[in-house]
Image (tube, rainbow, N blue to C red):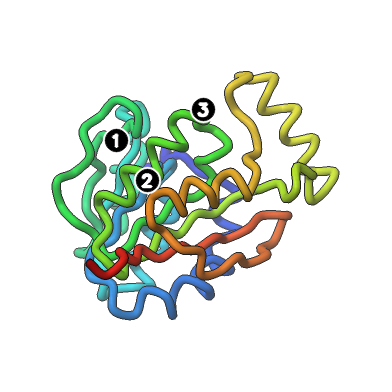
């Protein structure tokens, strides 16, 4: 298909992301991707991590584009998208060893970000990881002028959008018994955050 959606950012950031997540996902069997977008990440990671069954998800309007990438890839470990609006759709009943999401937290409204964290915590196996990629602010400050410009653009699209504060996001994680493992600096002023689900011993 020639009309597949294409993201230049996905093309650029796939390899740097893979380098960091590969060792984290050595024993992962089932992974849920929240907000698969164009489907490019899913195709790239499924091909490079063949031991993982990669479950795609997004809102319905993006499914056709994701499917065109999935079908063209021919990867047997790539699962067609389920409909997942984290605020309104039921979450899959399956448990996962890992959840991955890229460039979603600044597009979602804050209540959706909260809903994503609680949903992830419910669907992760104990010892599982949540990997979140995107731009974040620290101590209320932008990490670069380009991120500040990006924020202005986001707000012009929808005032509920915006670059999230790392501290606020990490608090959501802690409330959901997800413990921060890594905070990686990435190209283009992005971060790759990794939390692990560790239920306290009863």
Task: Kindly indicate the quadrant of the structure image that contains residue 159.
Answer: top right
- The residue tagged 2 is 34
Q: Nearer the viewer, residue 82 or 105?
A: 105
Q: Which mark is residue 109?
A: 3
User: Could you tell me residue 200's position as x and y percent?
Assistant: 31, 66
Q: Is residue 58 above or below residue 22?
A: above
Q: Is residue 150 above or below residue 88?
A: below
Q: Secondary structure at mark 1?
A: loop
Relative horizontal placement of residue 193, taking residue 60 as reference (left or right):
right
User: Could you tell me residue 156's position as x and y percent?
Assistant: 69, 19
Q: Are marks 1 and 2 in contact (CB under 8 Å)?
A: yes
Q: Nearer the viewer, residue 61 or 92?
A: 92
Which corner quadrant holds the C terminus? bottom left
Q: Residues within 10 Å of mark 3 (few under 14, many from 20)?
A: some
Spatial CA distance of label 3 from label 1 is 15 Å
Q: Which numbered disc, 1 or 2, marks the residue that appears first in the sequence?
A: 2
Q: Which numbered disc, 3 or 1, marks the residue that appears first in the sequence?
A: 1
- The residue tagged 1 is 84
The structure residue drawn at horizontal position 58% and vertical position 22%, both measured from the top left corner, is 160
The structure residue drawn at horizontal position 66% and vertical position 55%, both measured from the top left corner, is 190
Task: Kindly indicate the quadrant of the structure image that contains residue 158.
Answer: top right
Spatial CA distance of label 2 from label 3 is 15 Å
Q: Which numbered disc, 2 or 3, marks the residue that appears first in the sequence?
A: 2
Camera sees residue 200 = yes
Spatial CA distance of label 1 from label 2 is 7 Å
Q: Are marks 3 and 1 in contact (CB under 8 Å)?
A: no
User: Could you tell me residue 63's position as x and y percent?
Assistant: 31, 35
Q: Is residue 199 above or below residue 1?
A: below
The structure residue drawn at horizontal position 59% and vertical position 44%, both measured from the top left corner, is 168
Report the label total: 3
Q: Which mark is residue 17?
A: none
């Amino acid at each position: 298909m020639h009309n597949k959606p294409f993201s230049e950012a996905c093309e650029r950031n796939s390899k740097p992301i893979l380098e960091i997540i590969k060792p984290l996902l050595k024993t992962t069997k089932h992974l849920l991707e929240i907000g698969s977008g164009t489907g490019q990440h899913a195709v790239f990671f499924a091909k490079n991590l063949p031991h993982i069954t990669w479950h795609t998800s997004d809102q319905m309007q993006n499914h056709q584009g994701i499917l065109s990438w999935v079908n063209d890839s021919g990867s047997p470990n790539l699962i067609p998208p389920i409909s997942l609006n984290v605020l309104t759709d039921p979450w899959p009943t399956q448990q996962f060893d890992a959840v991955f999401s890229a460039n979603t937290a600044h597009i979602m409204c804050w209540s959706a970000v909260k809903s994503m964290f609680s949903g992830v915590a419910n669907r992760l196996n104990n010892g599982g990881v949540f990997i979140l990629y995107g731009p974040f602010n620290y101590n209320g400050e932008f990490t670069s002028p380009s991120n500040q410009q990006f924020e202005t653009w986001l707000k012009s699209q929808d005032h509920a959008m915006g670059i999230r504060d790392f501290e606020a996001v990490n608090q959501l994680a802690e409330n959901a018994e997800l413990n921060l493992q890594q905070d990686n600096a990435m190209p283009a002023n992005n971060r790759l955050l990794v939390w692990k689900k560790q239920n306290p011993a009863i």
